[in-house]
Amino acid sequence: MASSSSSSSSLPNLHPSHRAEVRIVTKASELPAAFLAPSPSSKLVIGFDNEGVKLGRDGTLCVMQLAFDDAIYIVDTIEGEENLVMKACKAALESEHVTKVIHDCKRDSEALYFQFGIRLNNVVDTQIAYSLIESQEQGKKVNDYISFVDLLADPRYCGVAYPEKEEVRLILKRNTEFWRERPLTEYKLNAAAADVRYLIHIYHKMMEKLSEKSLWYLAVRGGLYCRCFCGNAENWPPLAPEALKDENGKGPEEERIWVLDIPAGGWAREVIGDGGITIRNLRKASDAEIHIVERPPDDKAFIIGTEKEAKKAMAMVRGVWEHSEIS
């Protein structure tokens, strides 16, 4: 697999981080001091992602990618020193002084919380930011779950093709242990680095477009994404600064997470299916975000939105499973 940086060599306007060298980390001391000890006097913006086997609550986080301006650090949680993630990464991942730029953080946050007790905080989720920018430009709420490949290809943000992503997906279908297996070959390192190489560049492009109101929603929804699959997790930082107020003292309606138990036994996979036609139609018809997760003994629908939006979305989801039971 060729490094994606080679395909972008003809794009001189990209942020310097797209040419950053890749470094494997097995000891906390191999990471930058400003990351190890976050400080308001040395705030950071980094690209962030994780790879693993069934990444989430019950899987194994095998690799953590941290993209800085001058280097991409691949934290090896399999062969690294004992408690490497806790010693090297916990402080920064929970810190307000380190902005973590990531594309769809829900599973990453779930894995960090249940495997390491880390409450991921201060994320800029590019999937959320993309939807907010589309909403600004279209003048209505848009829940557009853009893929990372499509985001990279969008010339407004990056304009880089990423065909290697599908390569890796095919490998993972054949070998679910791909990220756990060692050594970390050049192919694996390039694959891991490619997922964070352009995130800082995309971040700066998005910050130029987002309005003050959208930036507030970005902070709120980023916090909700971090909590989304973590159940009744406690002691999380506040979602966002005090709500924006207009000239009449009125602020945006509060958004929160709503959890709906749905029938177990494969209903989520067979009737809705992540990315299936029914879930796509539900999402298009709802102003709330709907995420379906198989989690025995009951599957779950995680809904993000205002109370009015969430009630409508929950009624729609109930309607789908009640109809499926009748038929």
Image (cartoon, rainbow, N blue to C red):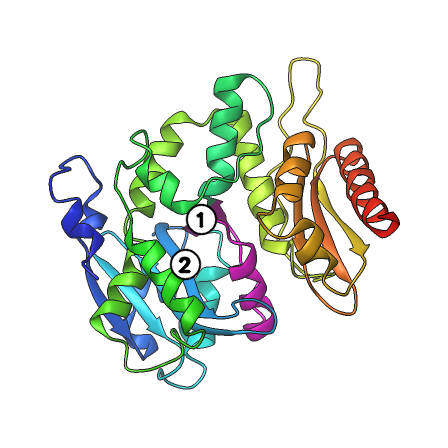
**Which of the marked residues, 2 or 1, is nearer the chain's N terminus?**
2
Residue type at mark 1: give it: His
Does residue 38 appear in the picture of this structure?
A: no
Residue matched to label 1:
103
Judge whether residue 113 is colored magenta.
yes
Counting every numbered tag in the picture gives 2
Left or right, 53 with reference to 78: right
Secondary structure at numbered mark 1: loop
Which disc is residue 150 wearing?
A: none
Residue range corresponding to the magenta coloring: 98-124
- Residue in the picture at 32% in, 63% down: 192
Give the Cα separation between the discs numbered 2 and 1: 8 Å
The residue at the point 65 percent across, 36 percent down is 281
Q: Is residue 173 left or right of residue 234?
A: left
Q: Decide whether residue 62 is among the magenta residues.
A: no
Q: Residue furthest front?
A: 327
> In the image, is 11 to the left or to the right of 234?
left
Position above or below: 150 against 48: above
**The one of 275 and 104 positioned closer to us in this rendering:** 275
Q: Percent from the top left, x then y, of residue 113?
A: 59, 67
Quarter of the image with the N terminus in it: bottom left
